[in-house]
């Protein structure tokens, strides 16, 4: 706001309060996509420093998007530059109402519908088409209440995060290909058509202020915020919050189309965003590499012998496989399954009929099945029939990674030669093995 309004530096931009607020929000945004990509490339996303950076960027991005959505609202862009508290209250009420309705529809109704389509029709393209259509409706609804469409899209994605793994796995390829093949090229083409050299007509002081003050202010503010709240590695946190992406350019395009900013300011800031996109990944990488990896941090203090080595090293599935374990049959009802089979540490269960593997039933599927249907619905009707498998000769650490990748806590163990079902392995068993070894009690294979 120091450079977008005339409160501190009057750069003669001629912006009203809400227009200045919207532009300030754009300059305050951080790119979650850029940060996630850098942290994944460095292998630090799951470490404490990566989690802290990721969380800080999520919070900053959501808050800034709401500020921008508020600022570019049609209710306040009607040509008036007066700040009206009544309009503010009305817009906040509309935003809250829209958020509640959107969250309910996308978090409660849509997942149930998609799961039913996935269960009975088995056509992933239909679920994808329905999701895409709902996304467009949410975007239009967001624009209607004065929010930017990107905020509606963000709410839509967050609300659908509770979808079962298999449904999300079927939806993501279509969503990704649509974005990369259609929307992203159109967006860059639209931004490029509006670029000009008009920014060269701006005073040199305006150019320097619009590019350097937000840069310095955001970095110093993020660093001091992390330092005051005693978060470790404030430099890495501040570097992560400097990330910029294509969302900023999209919002600048919206401000240009609404007449909030001219082509000179638009072109200057778009070029600045391109520089951010090119350079900030290197800054984040440098700052993150200054933080010692988790393994090196552990080396600072002596550890028990059982933890000093990798407790799962060399242990195979056959070493912990319990061949006597019982498994639910597909013919039992959901109610009987819930009453007799569910344990607190397990969320997925291998289902077997006789000696034949049938699939896996996940507790996450049960929340989309009304309890009134539990008594007459067989678990065989809600099975995941195509699932990953483990071999008796597989290393336990490899199977654990397979579980993480597939979002499962249990996998069937099948002989790769005869395809005979031999039992199941759960993540809880591997965890118990690690805990026993770490506490010095040791582990003896079954």
Image: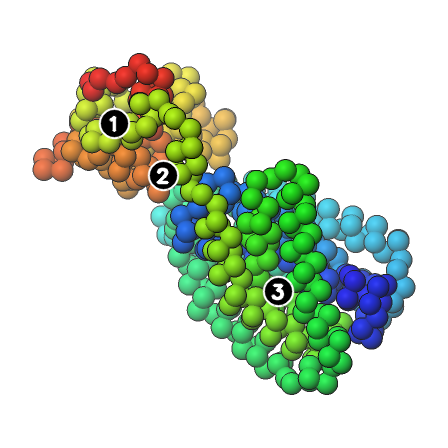
Q: Which mark is residue 404?
A: 2
Q: Residue furthest left?
A: 417
Along the polypeptide, which appears first: circle 2 or circle 3? Answer: 3
Residue 196, visible in the rendered structure: yes
Secondary structure of residue under mark 2: helix
Q: Is residue 257 left or right of residue 46?
A: right
Q: In the rendered structure, are the residues bearing label 2 and label 1 in contact, judged by CB atoms less than 8 Å apart?
A: no
Question: Which mark lies nearer to you, 2 or 1?
Answer: 2
Residue 444 vs 413, above or below: the answer is: above
Q: In the rendered image of this protein, does residue 244 appear above or below residue 193?
A: above
Whole-Å distance between the Cαs marked 3 and 1?
Answer: 48 Å
Image location of residue 130, percent across then percent down = 49, 55
107 relative to 152, above or below:
above
Residue at 78% over, 50% down: 92
Q: Can you tell which quarter of the image residue 428 is in?
A: top left
Distance of label 2 from label 1 (alpha carbons): 16 Å
Question: Where is residue 248 drawn, in percent x and y?
Answer: 62, 65
List the residue tagged with mark 3.
248
In this view, the residue in front, 78 or 235, is 235
Residue 159 at least partly seen:
no
Query: What is the quadrant of the C terminus in the image?
Result: top left
Q: Distance between the residues labelled 2 and 3?
A: 33 Å
Residue 385 percent across, percent down from the top left = 29, 39
Using residue 75 as the reference point, say whether residue 266 is left or right of it.
Answer: left
Residue 31 position within the rendered picture, expressed as x and y whole percent measured from the top left:
56, 57
Mark 3 or 1: in front is 3
Residue bearing mark 1? 424
For the residue labelled by badge 3, is the local secondary structure a helix, a strand or a loop?
A: helix
Residue at screen point 52% across, 65% down? 279
Q: In the image, what residue occupies the spot 45% across and 31% down?
A: 366
Query: SS of the residue at dot 1?
Result: strand
């Amino acid at each position: 706001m120091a450079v977008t309004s005339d409160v501190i530096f009057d750069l003669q931009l001629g912006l009203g309060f809400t227009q200045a607020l919207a532009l300030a929000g754009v300059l305050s945004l951080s790119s979650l996509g850029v940060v996630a990509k850098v942290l994944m490339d460095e292998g630090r996303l799951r470490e404490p420093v990566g989690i802290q950076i990721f969380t800080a960027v999520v919070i900053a991005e959501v808050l800034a998007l709401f500020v921008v959505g508020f600022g570019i609202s049609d209710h306040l862009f009607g040509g008036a530059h007066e700040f009206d508290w009544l309009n503010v209250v009305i817009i906040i009420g509309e935003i809250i109402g829209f958020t509640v309705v959107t969250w309910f529809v996308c978090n409660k109704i849509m997942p149930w519908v998609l799961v039913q389509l996935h269960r009975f029709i088995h056509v992933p393209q239909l679920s994808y088409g329905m999701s895409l259509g709902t996304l467009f409706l949410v975007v239009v609804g967001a624009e209607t209440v004065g929010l930017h469409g990107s905020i509606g899209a963000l709410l839509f994605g967050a609300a659908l995060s509770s979808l079962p793994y298999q449904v999300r796995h079927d939806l993501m390829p279509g969503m990704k290909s649509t974005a990369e093949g259609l929307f992203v090229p159109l967006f860059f083409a639209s931004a490029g058509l509006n670029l000009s050299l008009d920014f060269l007509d701006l005073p040199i002081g305006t150019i320097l202020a619009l590019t350097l003050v937000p840069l310095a202010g955001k970095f110093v503010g993020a660093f001091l915020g992390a330092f005051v709240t005693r978060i470790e590695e404030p430099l890495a946190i501040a570097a992560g919050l400097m990330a910029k992406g294509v969302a900023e350019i999209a919002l600048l395009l919206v401000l240009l189309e609404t007449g909030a900013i001219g082509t000179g300011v638009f072109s200057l800031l778009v070029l600045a965003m391109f520089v951010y996109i090119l350079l900030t990944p290197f800054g984040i990488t440098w700052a993150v590499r200054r933080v010692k990896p988790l393994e090196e941090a552990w080396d600072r203090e002596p550890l028990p012998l059982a933890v000093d080595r990798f407790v799962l090293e060399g242990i195979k599935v056959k070493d912990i496989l319990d061949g006597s374990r019982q498994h639910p049959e597909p013919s039992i009802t959901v109610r009987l399954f819930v009453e007799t089979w569910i344990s607190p540490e397990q969320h997925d269960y291998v289902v077997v009929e006789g000696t034949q593997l049938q699939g896996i039933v996940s507790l996450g599927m049960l929340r989309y099945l009304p309890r009134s249907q539990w008594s007459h619905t067989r678990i065989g009707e809600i099975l995941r029939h195509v699932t990953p498998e483990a071999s008796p000769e597989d290393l336990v650490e490899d199977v654990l990674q397979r579980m993480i990748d597939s979002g499962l806590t249990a996998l069937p163990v099948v002989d790769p030669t005869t395809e005979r079902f031999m039992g199941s392995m759960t993540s809880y068993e591997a965890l118990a093995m690690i805990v026993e070894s770490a506490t010095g009690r040791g582990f003896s294979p079954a």
